[in-house]
Amino acid sequence: MNDFQDRGAVHQVVFRWDGNHGRQGTGMNAVAYSCEAERAEELGRELGPLLWVSGAAAARPSVVRTLSRDGDVLLVQRWPTTDRGGRPSTVSHVLIGDRGTLTVDRCLGLAYRGGWRKQEKAEQASGPLSEFDRADLEELAWSRLPDMLERLPEVEHALILATAELLRDPTQRVSLLLEERTPRDWPTPDAVPVVYLGLFLIFGTWLRQTWTFATYDTVDSHPLQLMSVPRWEPDAGGSGPLARIMGRKEANPRFEQKAALQLVRHLLSHREAPAGLPQLVKELPDGASLDWERRRARLKEILSADRTPPAGTRMPTPALRAEEPGPAPARDRDLQRDRDLQRTQDRGRDGDQAWDGDQHWHGNQHWDRGGEPTRAVIASEPYRASSPEPFAEPYPEPYPEPYVNPAPTLRPPNPNTPAQPLQPPAHSPNGHEAYTLRRNLCAYRRGDVMGQSVLLAELRRQPDELLLDELCSGELPPESVELVLDVLGEPHRVQARPLDLQQELCAEVLRNDLYFTPHGPGAEGRSGADRASRAAYLFSWAVAPHVREERHLPELRSLLYRLSRDTHPTTGNWLRQSIIEPPNGQVPDLPPDLWSRLLGNALLRAERPPSTTPSPQAPPSPRTAPAPMAPSQPPDVTPDPIGITTRLSDMINKPSCFLGILLVLGVVLVGLVLMLFL
C-alpha cells in the first residue's frame, strides 16, 4: 500500500497555509503532491511543528532531514513567507525517498548552498505533481560535495568541539549556537551543512543513531540529532540529552578534546574516504554502547599510536561513499592500519608518553590564526583552545565537564556582616566533580536525608557561577532546584555576590515565576503556606533589590499582575509575605505604577461580592478571576482582602491618603474613649 517502497522513487509534497481547514495540528495543508492525497496529509501530521519556523529569528531558509514512521527519509526545504493575510508563515517542499536514495551525504549536498528548489516554485505549486527526478537530485548533490570537502578546514573548530561531545556521550543531540556576529573560526550559517558532513564522515554508523538534522531552527527541542539555533531556550529534556556548543575563550583541553583533535586531523587528511573513521568503526565498533570509562580507555589505546599524517597532507582515497547501512572496508585503510600496527610495535610501550608528550594542541596552526585564543566553549562541556605548551600530564580521569567557571575572586570581609559559620571556600570544580554533581542533583529525591546532607555540603563548596548554571540548565527536578536556591540564598553569599551575577539570577528567577505554583499540587510534603513562604523569601533576596531595574520591569509587571488578581489563598500568603509584611521588614521599593496596580486589583477583589451558590455550568470569563469560594484551608491561611487593601493604602505615598487614614483613626479613637468613660 505504501507507494514509497519502490526503491529509487522520490516523491514530493508542498505544504503551506491554505486557509483555516485541513489538519488541526499545524494549520498547514498539502497543496501539491506526487503521491496519494491521504499519504501527503499523513506526512504532514508526522512532520507537525517541523513545518513551522516561527519567532523573530525565523527569516532564514533551512533544510531538515528526518524519518517517517515507516522508515522513509523526509527531506524538508523551508522558507519564511507570509500567508494571504500578510502574517508570517512558512512554505515547505518535502522530498520522500528510501534511505538508499536520500542518503546522509546526498541530503547534506542538497542542503548546501540554496537547497534544490526555488521558493517561487513552491509558493506557486498546486495540485498533482510528478515524481522528482532522482538523477537531477544526485547530480546536484554530488556537484556540491567537492566544495564542501574543501571547506572542512574552515569548520575544524566546531568539528573538534562536537566530536568531543559525541565521543563522551554518543546518545547526545548536538546544538550549535549561531550568533548574530559570527566569532572567528566559528561556522557561518551557510557552512553548517559542512559541519554536519564532517561529523558524518568521522562517525558514520558508529553512533548507532539515525542521522537527522536541521540546518537552522529557532529552537533545539525537536527530536533531531544535529541542530543550529540563534539562541538557546531552557531545555526540558523531552527529546533526550542535549550538548549545546558555542564559541568562547578557554584553555586546557581534556581527553575527549585531544582525541577529537586527532580524529579531525585524520579526517582532514582523508577527506574523500568512506564515512566512518577506521579508529571508530573498525577498531572500536562497539564503542557507542560502552560506558564512558571503558570507551575512554579503548580510545586511549587506539589513538596512542600517532597514525595521523602531518596537517595538510592529502592522501589519495576512494570516492566518497556514504550509504547509511554502513561503510564498506577500503584497501587503503587496511594498509594504513597495518602500517600503524607496525609503528606501534616499533614504539614498544611508549605510546602513552608519545600521546602526552609529543601530541601538541597545534593552537597556532588551527586555532590561533591571529595570535590570540579563539572563542570556543561547549555549553555542557568546556573545550579549551590554544595551549602553547605540550600536555605535560597523562590522561586525567573522565572529564564530562558541564561547566566553565572563572577563577574565584577574593573579596574583603564586610565589617557590617554578622559572623557566619565557617564555610569551606568555593572552588572551581574539575570536570569529573561537576559531572558528578549534576548527576547527583538529577537523581536526588525528597526524603533522602543522607543524600540531602551530602548534596548541600557539596553545593556549598561550589561558586555562584556553577550554581547559576545548574539553575539555568532546566534539567534539575524541583527538589534539587530547591536545594540550589537554598544555597544561593544563604546570607553570606547574597551579600558577597557581584552585581552581574545578581542581575542574571534575578532574571532567571523571574523567568520561572519564582518557581512558585500556587494552584499546583506542590512537591511531596509541601503545603501551600510553605510554598508561599519559600517563594516570598526568594523574592526578598533575589528580586526585591532589583525591582527598580529597567531590564526586569516587564517580567516583574507580568508576575505581579497575575498574582495580585489571583484569589487563591496561597497567592494571598505570598503577597502578604513578599509585598505587605516581608519577614525582614524591608518593603520592596516598587515603582509607583506597580503599587497603583496592586492597590487597584486588591480593591477589585474586596468589592467583588462573594458567590454563595456557584453554578458549575457557568465558567468564568477568560480575563476575570473566579469569584472567591469558601476557603478549603484553615482560617489562618486565608488572607483578609480588607486587611490587604488597608495595608496597601498605608503604603501609598500620597499625602491625601495618609491624612485621610489619620482622620479616620482619630474619629475611631475618640469614639472608643467616649464609650469607655460615658
Image (spheres, grey):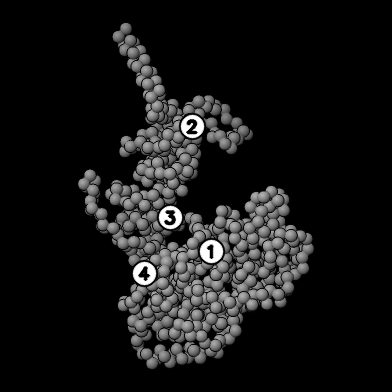
Residue 485, compared with residue 214, is above or below; it is above
Give the mark nearer the N terminus: 1 vs 3.
1
Residue 631 is labelled as none
**CB under 8 Å between discs 3 and 2:** no
Q: Which residue is mark 3?
A: 472
Residue 258, located in which quarter of the rendered image? bottom left
Counting labels gives 4
Query: Alpha carbon of mark 1 to alpha carbon of mark 3: how far?
Result: 20 Å
Residue type, mark 2 in image = Asn
Disc 3, SS: helix
Which SS class for mark 1? strand
Q: Which residue sits at x=55%, y=72%?
A: 194
- Alpha carbon separation for disc pair 1 and 4: 24 Å
Distance of mark 2 from mark 4, alpha carbons? 54 Å
Mark 2 or 4: in front is 4
Q: Quadrant of the N terminus?
A: bottom right
Q: Which residue is mark 4?
A: 251
Question: Which of the 4 image quarters holds residue 393?
Answer: bottom left
Residue at horizontal 50 percent and vertical 29 percent from the top: 604
Which residue was labeled with disc 1? 228
